Structure formats: C-alpha cells, structure tokens
C-alpha cells in the first residue's frame, strides 16, 4: 500500500510558506559578479560556483567592476582586495556609498589576513570576508546564504511597494 505523501513545508499562520533552505534556493535568476585581477583566481571561483546555476560575470579590477555593476547590477559581488586601478576596498566603499547599489552583498576575497585588513573591509561596508586560498564549501555556503538574504530582501521590497500602491500610504 503506498504511503501518503505529506508536504514537508506546512503553511504558517498567515498561509505563507517558510523561507526555503539553502539547498532549495532557485538561484537561476541570480547574478554573481566575481572581481579579481588574477585570471587563475577567477577561473577557480567560476569552477567552484558553476553548479549553483546562477549567472556568473567577471571583472578584472575595481573600475571594471563598477562599470559592470552600473550596466547590470548583480545580486552578489565577490571582490578581491589588491587590484590595479581601484582596490577592492575602494570599489566596496563606492558600491556601498551609492543608494542604488548599497544593498548588494559584497564578500571581500583576499590573501590579506591581518585583523586591520578585516577591520578595513568592514569599514568599507563589506558584508563578509574570505581569505585565500578559498575553500569551496565555505565559499558556496556563504554565497548561498547571502543570496538567500538578498532574494528575501528583494521580495520584501516588492511586497512593500505593492502594499503602498494598494493602500496609498507609506508602509515602511
């Protein structure tokens, strides 16, 4: 006799489903920008993240990153620190200083590992910090987690806009 199948995600009191687990996220509409002046580092990051299903774009330095962000804002940025033309610290400060891009999570990925470097990354607005050599599991887990937060924030913003348009007053 076949067992009845139960929905493992029962509705909450409001009838909405709980947020998906990291492994259940549909990242196919997500876009990740990888920024590093070292081609081998970019290739490694691309290889580590290719199974996520997200669109992966690359930039060779901070200037290219800002141009790429202006052209098509990503949902997450992995940003090397030590690069020519514009450092990751400078690029991060610029991203976080712009109201149009400040909500994009930025993960600083660097060989620097001194406490002062981490403090500087935080001061620039970085949301997370990974040291090289990057471990695949750690990278993928953090990327999924930050993308989940980003996607939930986008959903919240869209819901608030709908509520405002229906009610005709400020919901925030």
Image: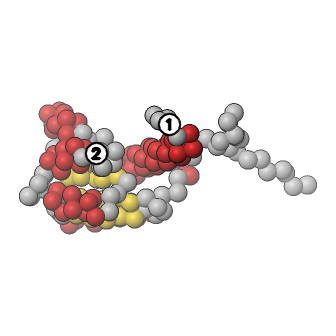
Residue placed farthest to the right in the image?
A: 1
Residue 138 visible somewhere in the drawing: no
Question: As drawn, is 144 to the left or to the right of 107?
Answer: right
Instruction: Identify the residue at horizontal 15%, vertical 59% (top origin).
Output: 63
Quadrant (top left/top right/bottom left/bottom right) for the C terminus:
top left
- Give me the C-alpha separation between circle 2 and circle 1: 22 Å
Q: Nearer the viewer, residue 103 or 166?
A: 166
Question: As drawn, is 165 to the left or to the right of 79?
Answer: right
Residue 155 is situated, as x and y percent measured from the top left of the image, at 50, 47
Number of other residues with Cα within 10 Å of mark 2, as a class: few under 14, some 14 to 19, many 20 or more: few
Instruction: Identify the residue at horizontal 87%, vertical 55% (top origin).
Output: 2
In the picture of the structure, the residue carrying the numbered disc 2 is 99
Q: Secondary structure at mark 1?
A: loop
Which comes before the other along the chain, label 2 or label 1?
2
Residue 9 is situated, as x and y percent measured from the top left of the image, at 68, 43
Q: Secondary structure at mark 2?
A: loop
Question: As drawn, is 79 to the left or to the right of 141?
Answer: left
């Amino acid at each position: 006799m076949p067992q009845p199948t139960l929905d493992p995600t029962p509705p909450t009191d409001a009838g909405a489903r709980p947020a998906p687990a990291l492994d259940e996220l549909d990242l196919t509409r997500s876009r990740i920008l990888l920024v590093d002046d070292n081609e081998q580092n970019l290739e490694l990051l691309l290889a580590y993240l290719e199974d996520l299903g997200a669109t992966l774009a690359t930039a060779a330095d901070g200037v290219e990153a800002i141009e790429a962000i202006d052209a098509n804002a990503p949902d997450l940025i992995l940003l090397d620190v030590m690069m020519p033309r514009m450092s990751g610290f400078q690029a991060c400060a610029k991203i976080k200083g712009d109201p149009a891009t400040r909500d994009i999570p930025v993960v600083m990925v660097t060989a620097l590992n001194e406490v002062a470097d981490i403090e500087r990354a935080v001061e620039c607005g970085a949301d997370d910090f990974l040291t090289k050599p990057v471990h695949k599991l750690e990278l993928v887990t953090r990327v999924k987690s930050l993308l989940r937060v980003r996607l939930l924030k986008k959903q919240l913003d869209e819901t608030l806009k709908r509520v405002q348009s229906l009610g005709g007053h400020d919901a925030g």
